[in-house]
Amino acid sequence: MRRDQLNEEEWRDVVRNADVLRRLPLRPTAGEIADAMAELAISRATLFRCL
């Protein structure tokens, strides 16, 4: 997805999601996974697909 294909709100969501994913260590704990899932409001499977 290219930046010019998104409106400002969509772009902010992409950046926010990337920031959450970037903070996760290579081997996240169950708690870190749960926190990221809650912050992004996504399922565990979706979180791991994003990673």
Image: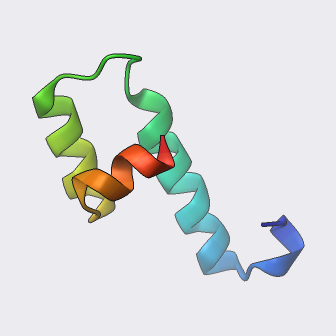
Residue at 27%, 45% in the rendered image: 36
Q: Is residue 38 left or right of residue 20?
A: left
Report the residue that reaches farthest toward the left: 31
In x, y percent, where is residue 9? 60, 78
Report the residue that reaches farthest toward the right: 4
In x, y percent, where is residue 40? 33, 59
Residue 31 quadrant: top left
Q: Nearer the viewer, residue 9 or 25?
A: 25
Q: Is residue 14 left or right of residue 32?
A: right
Q: Nearer the viewer, residue 35 or 46?
A: 46
Residue at 45%, 39% in the rendered image: 21
Q: Is residue 47 left or right of residue 35?
A: right
Q: Is residue 45 left or right of residue 26?
A: left
Q: Is residue 25 above or below residue 36?
A: above
In x, y percent, where is residue 29? 18, 22
Q: Is residue 22 above or below residue 39?
A: above
In x, y percent, where is residue 25? 38, 19
Q: Is residue 24 above or below residue 37?
A: above
Residue 10 quadrant: bottom right
Instruction: Locate the N terminus by quadrant.
Output: bottom right
**What colouring style does the render use?**
rainbow
Residue 14 quadrant: bottom right
Residue at 18%, 43% in the rendered image: 35
Residue at 84%, 66% in the rendered image: 2
Q: Is residue 16 above or below residue 8?
A: above
Task: Report how many numbered discs are placed on residues in the image.
Answer: 0
